[in-house]
Each structure stands twice: as C-alpha cells, then as structure tokens.
Image (cartoon, grey):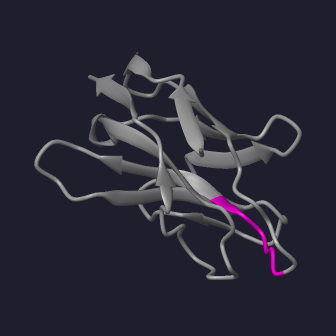
Amino acid sequence: RVQLVESGGGSVQVGGSLRLSCAVSGYPYRDGTYSSDCLGWFRQAPDQSREGVAFIYTDGSATYYGDSVQGRFTISHDNAKKTVYLQMNSLKPEDTAMYFCAADLPSYGSGGYCRGDYSGQGTQVTVSS
C-alpha cells in the first residue's frame, strides 16, 4: 500500500529555516496510461481550513506555490529516492501549522495543486517570535 512518511518538522524562530522531507513508498500499479505524479504539501493550523503550500509534477512540467509562501519556500523531488522536499526559509509565525505530504499517483494530467489522493500523518512546524 502507498505510504507517505514526513520528517523534518520542529520549532524555529522567526526568520529561520526548516526542510521537510516526505518519502513515498508502495507505488500503485501503472498501466499504459501513466502520466506524471503530483507530490506536494498542504498545511493546516488549528481552527483553520487546509491550505495548499507547494506542489510539483515529477515529469518536471510544473511547480505551484501558495501565495503566502511564494518566494520563501521551494519544493523539489528526488525520483531515485522517491522523496519530495520542502525547503522553508524566512519563516513567519503564520507558517505555524501541521504540514501534510500529499501525492497523486498518478496525476492523470490534472494540473494545479495535487488532489491529495494519498496523504501522510503530518509533521508539526512551529515558528516563534
């Protein structure tokens, strides 16, 4: 079965950096219609709705960022390691949330943010002033 395991969360002061990792395993069967996978991150703070953070298509076709993180966060992936990364710089208190790895395996050419067909358990990021 598909598993997404996040790591790298923690506590950091304003302006600091963290790098989240998400290892993906148990890929489903791919038939002849296979298209690119979508990997990425959502986040959710207490009493707030889920927010799309960053997403990447593994064929290199596109990346997407939420408006609030554009220019500060960078998403990347390593196909050989089946891992997606989120480099977070210039962190702000409003970045405090549980961060969830998400994957669409495959994306079926949907474009934009991942649907989140698969999701990890989450890793907490806390930014203090």
Relative placement, left or right, of 118 versus 92 is right
What is the magenta segment's predominant secondary structure? loop
Q: Is residue 3 above or below residue 71?
A: above
User: In the depicted view, which residue is nearer to us: 71 or 38?
Assistant: 38
Q: Quadrant of residue 31?
A: bottom right
- Where does residue 108 sit, x and y in percent of width and height? 68, 79
Relative placement, left or right, of 38 versus 42 is right
For the C terminus, the image quarter is: top left
User: In the depicted view, which residue is nearer to us: 122 or 126?
Assistant: 122
For the N terminus, the image quarter is: top right
Q: Quadrant of residue 52?
A: bottom left
Total numbered labels: 0
Relative placement, left or right, of 80 versus 114 is right
Q: Give me the residue at 66% from left, 72% from top.
A: 107
Residue 88 visible within the image = no
Residue 32 visible within the image = yes
In the rendered structure, does residue 88 fall within the stretch colored magenta?
no
Q: Is residue 39 above or below residue 101?
A: below
Q: Give me the residue at 46% from left, 24% from top.
A: 9
Q: Quadrant of residue 14?
A: top left
In the rendered structure, does residue 35 fall within the stretch colored magenta?
yes
User: In the depicted view, which residue is nearer to us: 98 or 23?
Assistant: 23
Q: Is residue 6 above or below residue 57?
A: above
- Where does residue 55 sit, x and y in percent of width and height? 60, 60
Q: Give me the residue at 57% from left, 39% from top.
A: 3
Q: Give me the residue at 56% from left, 39% from top.
A: 4
Relative placement, left or right, of 74 versus 4 is right
Which residue is at the far left? 47
- Where does residue 126 sit, x and y in percent of width and height? 32, 26
The span picked out in magenta is 33-38
